Image (cartoon, grey):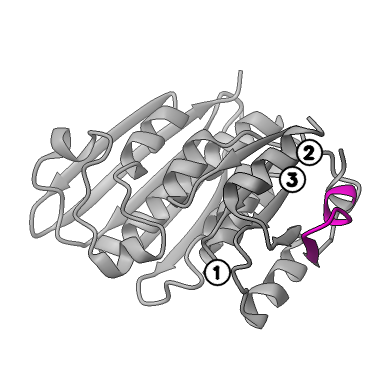
Amino acid sequence: MTVESLAKLDGMTPLVLCEPEREIDGVYIGDLLSWVMGNASSGDAWITIMSNINILAVASLSDVSTIVLAEGVALEEAVIATAKEKGINIISSELSTFETAVLLSHFL
Amino acid sequence: MSEILNFHFDVDGDDFTSAGKASVQVKKNLRQLGLPPEIIRRVSIAMYEGEINMVIHAGGGKADVNVTEEYVEILLCDNGPGIKDVEQAMQEGFSTATDNIRSLGFGAGMGLPNMKRYSDYMDIKSKVGEGTDITMRVNIN
């Protein structure tokens, strides 16, 4: 599925959609940034509850298709602005990390 | 004769929010050079881990990236406290990062292991009280 179609599902809110047509090839879940960098694959949707600005560099370098901010975690305006600048997709999910992953699993 | 392309960066030690700047720039530069995506991914992740280490532990430093026909070479140099036991530091899960750093999602003890994992060659020269020099190479072919 594309990042845009994920963003349209119930419980999902698009925060930044720079590349809406980007295909989601898999899912990676994690909050330890180096762990994510070492294990996420290019094209994965990355589910996390980390919201500091460093997630943008991690998303960009590991080339994930989108960040999915689970559990309704809020994102600062400055992070949203930088994500737009850097072209990084971010979707907010009001579901728990587990529920978000289960939802995604139906489309992979 | 193959020409060597060099990119130089000063890594700011104070600014945690802009950490990763050099790595993201290198990713862009390598993309412009038309290198394969997987090579670019490996170089930029290895470099990001090194850059973050310099910010967390060494108060910044210098980074140089050399691109040859055979490999991309990353040279990281800092005047930080040095690594007491390199073998121990290379173990997954070992970290000396503070709780504050950990709360940002760093300090998983995966930085150096990731650098080794994503490079084809890695050498660490470190002296306590003087600093650390790291060389990494990612082969292009």
Image quadrant holding the N terminus of chain B, namely top right
Local crowd size for mark 1, using a 10 Å CA cut-off: few (<14), some (14–19), many (≥20): many
Circle on res. A53: 1
Q: Residue furthest bottom?
A: A77
User: Which amino acid type corresponds to the residue marked 3 in the rendered image?
Assistant: Ser
Which residue has dot 3 on it? A65
Mark 1 and mark 2: Cα distance apart in space: 22 Å
> Which callout, 1 or 3, points at the residue further toward the start of the chain?
1
Residue A100 position within the rendered picture, expressed as x and y whole percent measured from the top left: 67, 48
> Which callout, 3 or 2, points at the residue further toward the start of the chain?
2
Image quadrant holding the C terminus of chain B, namely top right
User: At numbered mark 3, what does the secondary structure look like: helix, strand or loop?
Assistant: loop
Mark 3 and mark 2: Cα distance apart in space: 6 Å
Residue A108 position within the rendered picture, expressed as x and y whole percent measured from the top left: 78, 30
Say left or right for B90 vs A72: left
Please report the bounds of the magenta region as a residue range.
Answer: A5-14
